[in-house]
Amino acid sequence: MSENCSGSCESCQENCASRKPESLLAEANPKSHVKKVIAVVSGKGGVGKSTVASLFAVAMAKLGYKTAILDADITGPSIPKAFGLHEPAIANDDGILPEETRNGIKIMSINLLLENETDPVVWRGPIVAGAVKQFWTDVCWGDVDYMFVDLPPGTGDVPLTVFQSLPVNGVILVTSPQDLVSMIVSKAVNMARMMNVPLYGFVENYSYLICPDCGKQIEVFGKSKLDEIALSYSLPVLARLPIDPGLAALLDDGKIDEADVSAILPAAELIAKAE
């Protein structure tokens, strides 16, 4: 530390040991009071990550918490349709107002800002990442206990922006039983650890199918190796979710808030008890 150090690193050019790293965290909208931010990630697409994020939000709402979903999948948004939201979001002098589901879950997605919800979003990576950041800075979220951020698959611009710009309290990793998916999800684990973001654990989707005739559990995608992977990373398996045609029908009808969340409720309770 220099003898003339004032304690402020903003205008100082010295590269001393006491220099504080610059924070990349973005300031939330003044009308937002979000207690915990939880990122829902996967190594690749097609594992039902948006479904898992929605189920967690519904489960937390059933536990009595004020919940929200920030749909960070700008080029493939699906959260509004899952909850039956089709009206465009409105704004006032304070910022953009999130839409609310029938049970009070607050939602913000690019599909709520497009003139037509089927319009493609043909943007380059930095613009997509900037839009996600604006969902944090420009949206008046109000009082929220748990915000779930539905991230696009992979380890690109958007996950990096979320981990650096939002105060993420923890990560839920979504996978499925196939060996390929389990291998790729390891990349998401390693990225979160590189960014020093805590990991809550794994949720395995499409884990099994219950035969409608005999009730037997059928492992459609083969024997899961998630227990071995979770053990190698010292992380718990939070839940295993079945292939459920009834849930798929609720998603198509925009009624996921009516879904049975008993399979994921223990995981939600565990996260609610975490520091």
Image: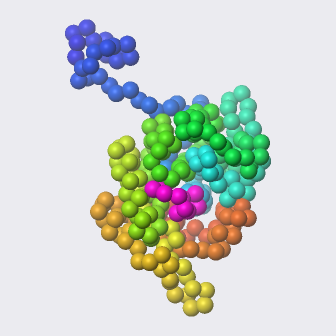
The picture places residue 33, in percent across and down from the top left corner, at: 56, 38
Q: Is residue 134 visible?
A: yes
Q: Is residue 146 visible?
A: no
* 141 or 225: nearer the viewer: 225
Q: Identify the residue at horizontal 47%, vertical 67% (top origin).
A: 176
* 60 or 37: nearer the viewer: 37
Q: Identify the residue at horizontal 38%, vertical 17% (top origin).
A: 10
Q: Identify the residue at horizontal 62%, vertical 47% (top origin).
A: 75
Q: Identify the residue at horizontal 53%, vertical 50% (top origin).
A: 151
Q: Residue furthest top?
A: 4
Give the colour scheme shown. rainbow
Side of 116 relative to 238 (left or right):
right
The picture places residue 231, in percent across and down from the top left corner, at: 30, 65
Q: Does 237 sit above or below residue 25?
A: below
The picture places residue 11, in percent across and down from the top left corner, at: 37, 13
Question: How many marks are shown on the rendered structure?
Answer: 0
Q: Does 218 sit above or below residue 248?
A: below
Side of 5 relative to 47 (left or right):
left
Q: Which residues are magenta?
A: 40-52
Q: Quadrant of residue 209?
A: bottom right
Q: Does 223 sit above or below residue 98?
A: below
Q: Does 82 sit above or below residue 95?
A: below
The picture places residue 128, in percent across and down from the top left corner, at: 58, 39
Q: Based on the picture, tell me whether residue 49 belongs to the magenta stretch.
A: yes
Image quarter (top left, top right, bottom left or bottom right) of the N terminus: top left
Side of 110 relative to 230 (left or right):
right
Side of 27 relative to 233 (left or right):
right
Q: Based on the picture, tell me whether residue 135 belongs to the magenta stretch.
A: no
